[in-house]
Amino acid sequence: MAQPTLTVAQVCPDCDGFPAVKITLGGRDSTGALRMITAHCFACHGTGNRRSLRRPHRTVTA
């Protein structure tokens, strides 16, 4: 029986695996908490991994 192959996720070169970051806008809101927004990596869409450019291999059996 064939063993399943493991796919190794490659780290996104644009964000180095840190796909989402919190950025402070400066100042505080009425409760005293810092005002922050979350920014996601545009290249990997917040996953931290880059997609393989190869198409998956499909075996046709009859």
Image (cartoon, rainbow, N blue to C red):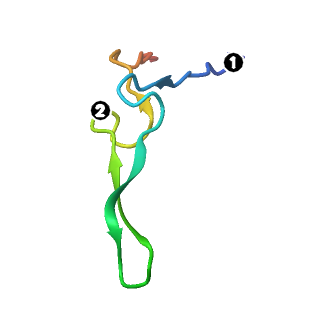
**Which residue is at 33% across, 17% downward?**
53
The quadrant holding residue 6 is top right
Between the residue at mark 2 and the residue at mark 1, the CA separation in whole angstroms equals 32 Å
Q: Nearer the viewer, residue 30 or 41?
A: 30
The quadrant holding residue 46 is top left
Mark 2, mark 1: which one is toward the viewer?
Answer: 2
Q: Nearer the viewer, residue 49 or 61?
A: 49
**Which residue is at 46% across, 37% downward?**
18
Find disc 2 in the rendering and name its residue.
Answer: 43
Amino acid type for the residue under numbered disc 1: Gln
Residue 3 tag number? 1
SS at badge 1: loop
Percent of width and height locating residue 55: 34, 18
**Which residue is at 46% across, 17% downward?**
61
Marks 2 & 1, CB-CB < 8 Å contact = no
Horizontal side of 26 relative to 49 (left or right) equals: left
SS at badge 2: loop
Q: Nearer the viewer, residue 62 or 11?
A: 11
The quadrant holding residue 37 is bottom left
**Which residue is at 61% across, 18% downward?**
5
Residue 13 vertical position relative to residue 17 in the rendered view, above or below: above
Label 1 crowd (10 A; few <14 / some 14-19 / many >=20): few
Percent of width and height locating residue 60: 42, 17
Amino acid type for the residue under numbered disc 2: Ala
Q: Nearer the viewer, residue 36 or 54?
A: 36
